[in-house]
Each structure stands twice: as C-alpha cells, then as structure tokens.
Image: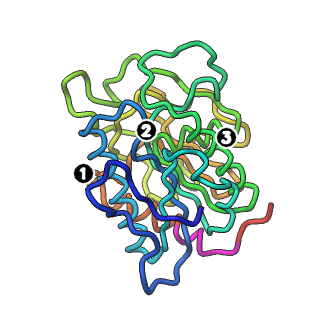
C-alpha cells in the first residue's frame, strides 16, 4: 500500500505523499478518483475535496499517503497493511455495492459502484479497528464504516431536500445537523448544532453493531456514527468542502491527527 497516487484523470500528479520535513503521524487516505459513472464535473469536485483534506492534514503536521482504490485490484496490495500507518481516513465517492449490506435487488439511483474498491476498504477498516488505529470516514467513508460493523444503508433518500440539490441544481447544500451532547464528535467540533455541507442520496439505516448514532438531520436521518470506546467516527457530510466551515473542519481533523499521534489503542 505504500504508494502515492497516479490519478488516471488528473491534470498532473497533484496528490503528493508524505510532506517533506514532517515527523507527524502517518495517515493512510483511501479514495477513488476514477470510479464508474463519473463526469468531468464529478472528477473536478472529487479532486477538490481530496486536495482540501490532504492539505488540511499536512497543515496539521500529518504525513498523508493517498491510496487510489479505483486502480485494478492487483495493484492495491494487501488492505491490512493499513495497520502499518497511524490512522485511516476514508474519503467520499460512489455508492457501496448493495449486496454488501444485504440488498440483493437493484436499488434506485445507484451511482459509481465499484465492488472491488468497497471490499478493499471494508477489509482495511476492520484491520485498522482491530489494530487500535483511529478511523475517520466522510460520506461514503461513513457508510463503509457502518457496513464494516454489520450495519445497513438507506439506498435512496426519497425526500432529498435537506441532503442534496435537486435536478439541475448544485449537488451540495447547507444542511443543519444536531450532534448528541457528550459524544466524541461533540467534543471534537465543540458544538451540538452545525451547518454542514451535504450532497448525498444514501445514508446509514440500521446502525452497525458496536456503533452508535451521534448526529441526525432535521428529518431524523443519521448523519454521524461513532464507536463508544474506540476512536472510530463516520460523518455523512463533507467537512473537506472548501465552501464549508473551516473552523469545524480544523477541529475535527485536528482531533483525528492528535489521536493518530497517540500509541495504538489496545485490541
């Protein structure tokens, strides 16, 4: 896994690996830059979000290594090698394959499904958790965390208005979410009522075993989960969107980097 990205649809290699001269924690960043169904506009958005996440981590002293999960599986190596890193961060992207959360039939509005990338990420999440590594996932990453713990997903949110733009509108919207007091997430963002950037048509349905729901949208949809004992957090929104709150992004990422700098949690 010890690789930097060579993105298939990139304008040059603008996703460098570890920042020179840093001795902070090493974070494996999993994401796909070339999954199915992407338009040029989608690609530009995904790269913008990934760039912001990596720049934020490097600004906090972390050494990030991007792992492109949409490359052929034979090129990815062993997903359990994430345990050689100090933490695991999962970016957003396409939908999780429905069979991986118990939906054998076709689901509506499926987009960007790449089962190979899903299975790689799920194995990586389980290995990182078992090794006591902090895990943080956004959007698709949050959904993958839930599936890794045996949870299910809402395949398509029918009333999308709080969660994404409508046809012909920008994908991302400002969404209000309420964070449960006393949770790890509330301590990280130092607030219980947030305005966040969202653009999703799926979300956590049945919360996976050991996880708890710690944030909800105004319509009750789960917007974040966490493990009560281990440093595992999944958030449905996009703190790495440059149009969102820089304060909340820095607080969240800073807390994750600090956790990655600690000795691994016991198994």
Q: Secondary structure at mark 2?
A: loop
Q: Earlier in the sequence, mark 2 or mark 3?
A: 2
Q: Earlier in the sequence, mark 1 or mark 3?
A: 3
Left-right relation of 130 to 74: right
Residue 19 screen position, x and y as percent = 42, 77
* Residue identifier under label 3: 148
Q: Find the distance from the CA under tag 1 to the CA under tag 3.
A: 30 Å
- The residue most toward the top is 105
Q: Can residue 83 be found in the magenta stretch?
A: no
Q: Nearer the viewer, mark 1 or mark 3?
A: 3
For residue 254, the mark is: none
Across the whole image, how many numbered discs are drawn on residues?
3
* Residue identifier under label 2: 35
Left-right relation of 25 to 20: right
Q: Residue at x 48, y 31 (%)?
A: 95
- The residue most toward the right is 267
* Residue identifier under label 1: 243
Which portion, as a residue range, is magenta? 257-263
Its colouring scheme is rainbow
Q: Find the distance from the CA under tag 2 to the CA under tag 3.
A: 20 Å
Q: Residues within 10 Å of mark 2 (few under 14, many from 20)?
A: some
Residue 128 screen position, x and y as percent = 68, 57
Q: Nearer the viewer, mark 1 or mark 2?
A: 2
Residue 5 screen position, x and y as percent = 44, 59
Q: Secondary structure at mark 3?
A: helix
> In this orientation, which residue lies closer to the viewer: 67 or 100?
67
> In this orientation, which residue lies closer to the viewer: 246 or 172?
172
Q: Earlier in the sequence, mark 1 or mark 2?
A: 2
Q: Give above or below for 1 relative to 234.
A: below
């Amino acid at each position: 896994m010890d690789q930097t990205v060579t993105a298939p649809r990139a304008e040059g290699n603008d996703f460098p690996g570890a920042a020179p001269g840093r001795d902070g924690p090493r974070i494996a960043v999993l994401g796909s830059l070339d999954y199915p169904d992407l338009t040029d506009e989608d690609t530009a958005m995904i790269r913008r979000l990934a760039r912001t996440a990596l720049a934020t981590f490097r600004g906090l002293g972390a050494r990030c290594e991007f792992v492109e999960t949409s490359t052929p599986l034979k090129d990815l190596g062993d997903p359990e090698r994430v345990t050689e890193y100090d933490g695991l961060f999962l970016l957003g992207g396409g939908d999780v394959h429905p069979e991986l959360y118990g939906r054998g039939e076709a689901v509506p509005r499926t987009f960007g499904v790449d089962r190979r990338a899903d299975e790689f990420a799920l194995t990586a999440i389980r290995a990182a958790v078992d090794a006591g590594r902090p895990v943080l996932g956004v959007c698709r990453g949050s959904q993958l965390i839930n599936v890794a713990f045996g949870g299910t997903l809402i395949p398509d949110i029918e009333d999308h208005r709080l969660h994404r733009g409508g046809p012909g509108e920008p994908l991302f919207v400002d969404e209000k979410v309420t964070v449960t007091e006393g949770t790890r997430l509330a301590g990280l963002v130092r607030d219980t009522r947030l305005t966040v950037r969202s653009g999703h048509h799926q979300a956590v349905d049945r919360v996976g075993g050991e996880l708890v729901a710690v944030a909800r949208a105004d319509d009750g949809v789960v917007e974040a989960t966490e493990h009560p004992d281990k440093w595992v957090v999944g958030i449905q929104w996009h703190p790495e969107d440059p149009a969102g709150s820089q304060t909340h992004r820095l607080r969240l990422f800073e807390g994750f980097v600090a956790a990655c700098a600690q000795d691994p949690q016991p198994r």
